[in-house]
Image (cartoon, helix red, strand yellow):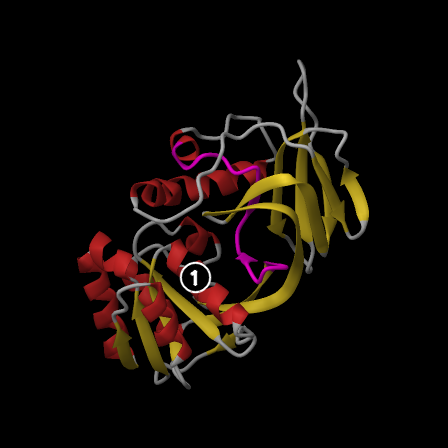
């Protein structure tokens, strides 16, 4: 991992939702960053101003103060402008940030701000789809309704341990998103779907086998981890598992949840793993 000097020039973008959610944590983060580096602070009022601020960062290192949704927005913008390779992104979590913490960002405001100043860049994989969307944590098909997923934990034994952990990480995030007046497509109730799922050209499940759930996450060594739960009557179905660099899903008007955002309906979508595509500044190894 590459380390940074505390004299770096920073562009601190404070997400508007963070200012509304916890103004005191925002103030503390801003004070710590400004005391340790030359920091230009931006207060965008919406996604358009957020994008303009990030696009005009120049040589400054971008720091996002906000929740997981702000982090995903920043990575998506950099990906769409093909600027991820040369940009190390930092985040100070304010609000729901289960994803950021799972990636190694400290939970406390002061600790996270100190990691921005003294930390190291860790290169991480992501999933990029054929519409220039990204997935940092988890992709789910079909998407569970926001309120249901916030209220109901994944039942014990209902999937592999890593999937249950991922769901728990997103429950608090989903609570905030369901209360926020975001313009997300309505998600139908989760239920069996007929999908064809191909991993590196090999069919894992075809349209003649209804499925209850599909999960795709960036795995290790540039491979996506794919889990498919076929529809079962009576006994609990066995999860089908595969790994690969490219995942293509085909079906009749299906929707999907990429991290916390519902997209679709679409009839075909392909995700590919971009190995080491983006950099996140985290505490140095061993801290």
The spot of residue 63 in percent (x, y) is 36, 71
On screen, residue 149 versus residue 193, left or right, reads: left
Residue 214 in magenta? no
Q: In which quadrant is the N terminus drawn? A: bottom right
The image shows residue 155 at horizontal and vertical percentages of 51, 26
**For mark 1, does the 10 Å Cα neighbourhood hold few (<14), some (14 to 19), or many (20 or more) residues?**
some
Q: Image quadrant for the C terminus?
A: bottom left
Q: Residue at x 64, y 31 (%)?
A: 193
Residue at left 73%, top 48%?
Answer: 243
Query: Which residue: 67% across, 36% down?
Result: 228
Question: Could you tell me which residue is drawn at 56 percent across and 42 percent down?
Answer: 255
Q: Secondary structure at mark 1?
A: helix
Evaluate whether residue 237 shows in this view. yes
Q: Looking at the picture, how far across and down is residue 166, in whole percent?
A: 51, 42
Q: Quadrant of residue 172?
A: top left
Image height check: is 70 above or below 39?
above
- Residue range corresponding to the magenta coloring: 127-147
Residue 114 shows in this picture: no
- Against 121, residue 164 (above or below) is above
| 194 relative to 55 in the view: left or right | right
**71 and 196: which is toward the camera:** 196
Which residue position holds label 1? 73
Q: Is residue 205 left or right of residue 98?
A: right
Return the x and y of residue 150 as percentages of the image width and height.
39, 35
């Amino acid at each position: 991992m590459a380390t940074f000097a505390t004299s770096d020039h920073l562009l601190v973008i404070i997400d508007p939702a963070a200012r509304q959610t916890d103004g005191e944590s925002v103030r503390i983060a801003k004070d710590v960053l400004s005391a340790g580096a030359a920091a230009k602070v931006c207060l965008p009022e919406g996604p358009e101003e957020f994008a303009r601020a990030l696009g005009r960062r120049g040589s400054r290192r971008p720091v996002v103060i906000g929740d997981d949704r702000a982090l995903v927005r920043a990575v998506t913008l950099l990906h769409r402008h093909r600027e991820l390779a040369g940009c190390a992104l930092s985040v100070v979590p304010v609000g729901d940030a289960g994803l950021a913490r799972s990636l190694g960002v400290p939970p406390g405001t002061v600790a996270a701000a100190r990691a921005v100043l003294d930390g190291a860049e860790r290169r991480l994989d992501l999933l990029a789809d054929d519409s220039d969307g990204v997935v940092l944590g988890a992709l789910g098909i079909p998407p569970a309704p926001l309120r249901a997923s916030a209220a109901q934990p994944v039942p014990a034994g209902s999937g592999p341990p890593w999937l249950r952990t991922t769901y728990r990480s997103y429950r608090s995030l989903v609570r905030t998103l369901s209360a926020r007046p975001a313009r997300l497509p309505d998600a139908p109730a989760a239920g069996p779907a007929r999908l064809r799922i191909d991993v590196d050209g090999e069919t894992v499940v075809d349209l003649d086998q209804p499925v209850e759930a599909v999960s795709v996450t960036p795995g290790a060594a540039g491979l996506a981890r794919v889990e498919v739960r076929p529809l079962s009557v009576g006994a609990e179905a066995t999860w089908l598992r595969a790994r690969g660099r490219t995942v293509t899903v085909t079906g009749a008007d299906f929707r999907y949840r990429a991290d916390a955002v519902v997209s679709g309906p679409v009839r075909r979508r392909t995700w590919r793993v971009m190995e080491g595509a983006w950099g996140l500044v985290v505490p140095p190894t061993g801290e």
